[in-house]
Amino acid sequence: MLAIAFAAVALLVPSTTGASVPKHARSQHESTQPWSVSNFDSLITFGDSYTDESRLGWFINHNGTAPPAGSLSPENFVTASGGRTWPRYVIQYTSSSGNGNGSEWMPQTTLYDYAVSGAMVLINQRTVPLRPGIRTPRLPSRPDRSARELISPEPFFTPSLTATSAVYALWIGTNDLGVWAFLTDSQVPGKVLSDYTSCVYEVFNALYASGGRMFVLMNTAPLHLAPLYANASLHGVGANQYWPAKPANLTQIAETMHEYTSTVNAVLEYRTLFENLVAHRYPGARFALFDMYSLISDIYDAPSNYLNGTGVLDGGESVWGYENDCDLNQTVCVKRDNGTNSDAFLWFDELHPR
């Protein structure tokens, strides 16, 4: 996730200078460099386990009840990706020292993480299993519903969210397209891929209605490269913790997933342009389309440019292997090199980027 975070920071860093902008000078700066990190006080994220820091745990421990709006999730090093999430890295690398001499670190941006592991924008026919034989409770994990929490006259957020000081990021689709959903024909009858992409913009409808104007849409990852969905030549896995009854035809699985992700990403690219420039669906808003598909594909093809662990080789186990190997019941998990070489792997487990 560190490489992903660096790319996210690059999106927000001003192109001309990295210097911070005083609060009193923000108005002019916001109009000339609207995506400068110095404009933002808050990062609000929505998505699934690729982004969730601790929200699923809250739901499980509180009988499916959501935390209060504006709650700050504690930093969590035990996540689906095996450590800190990409939004938390963004907060770290876009922050500054508060006392001027560099001895006391102070975050410039506050993170509000609304992502929930297992979240979908579409509802499938069955709940997604967290582990074999155990279904998740029916949680309010759809991003559009979480987004509606922001529509309130109450001052839940400190600092308050404004059109130019808050940036909203959405990364969703891994669960909608994968096992227990489209890939296994488990989606709601009659639903097609375009229903998934339409739901993405329903999330932005809710965020826009809440006053948001700065949006980052992250497209779907190249899931056909993940060990869970890869073909045999790319060392795809058989039965595993996420898919205990996985079929043997890995080629069909990989090609279907490749088709799904490529198709929806093309739709997201052109529809984002259409909704903003032709339909004028979000007047005054700014959108950034973050190409996660290309970024992760590039890490896969040239890992030595991104991964700083030992033994990183192009085409090697760093990209087709994964660090954390669990049995089907998730009762026994073993980390490669006892977890001492995490930065050498693109994937933490069969599904989640490290």
Image: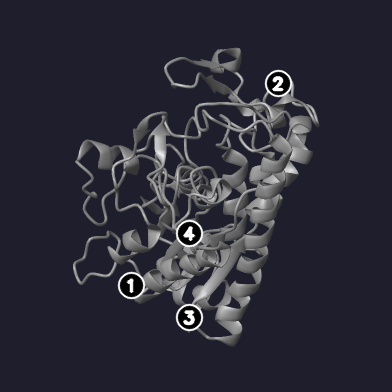
Q: Which residue corresponds to the image point at 67% horizontal and 61% vertical from the top-left?
A: 263
Report whether residue 21 is seen. no
Q: Could you tell me the amino acid type at mark 3?
A: Tyr
Instruction: Report the Cα–Cα distance between label 4 and label 1.
Output: 14 Å
Mark 2 or 1: in front is: 1
Taking the spot 71% from the left edge, 52% from the top edge, the residue there is 294
Q: Earlier in the sequence, mark 4 or mark 1?
A: 4
Residue nearest the viewer, comparing 94 with 263: 263
SS for callout 2 = loop
Query: Is residue 235 or residue 288 the one in the foreground?
Result: 235
Q: Specify the label residue 169 is tagged with.
A: 4
Q: CA distance from mark 2 to mark 3?
A: 46 Å
Name the foreground residue: 171 vs 76: 171
Q: CA distance from mark 2 to mark 1?
A: 46 Å
Give the residue number, with chain letter if any, for mark 2.
310
Q: Which mark is residue 282?
A: 3
**Amino acid residing under circle 1:** Ser
Q: How is the image coloured?
A: one colour
Mark 1 is surrounded, within 10 Å at the Cα level, by few (under 14), some (14 to 19) or many (20 or more) other residues, namely: some
Q: Is residue 93 above or below residue 339?
A: below
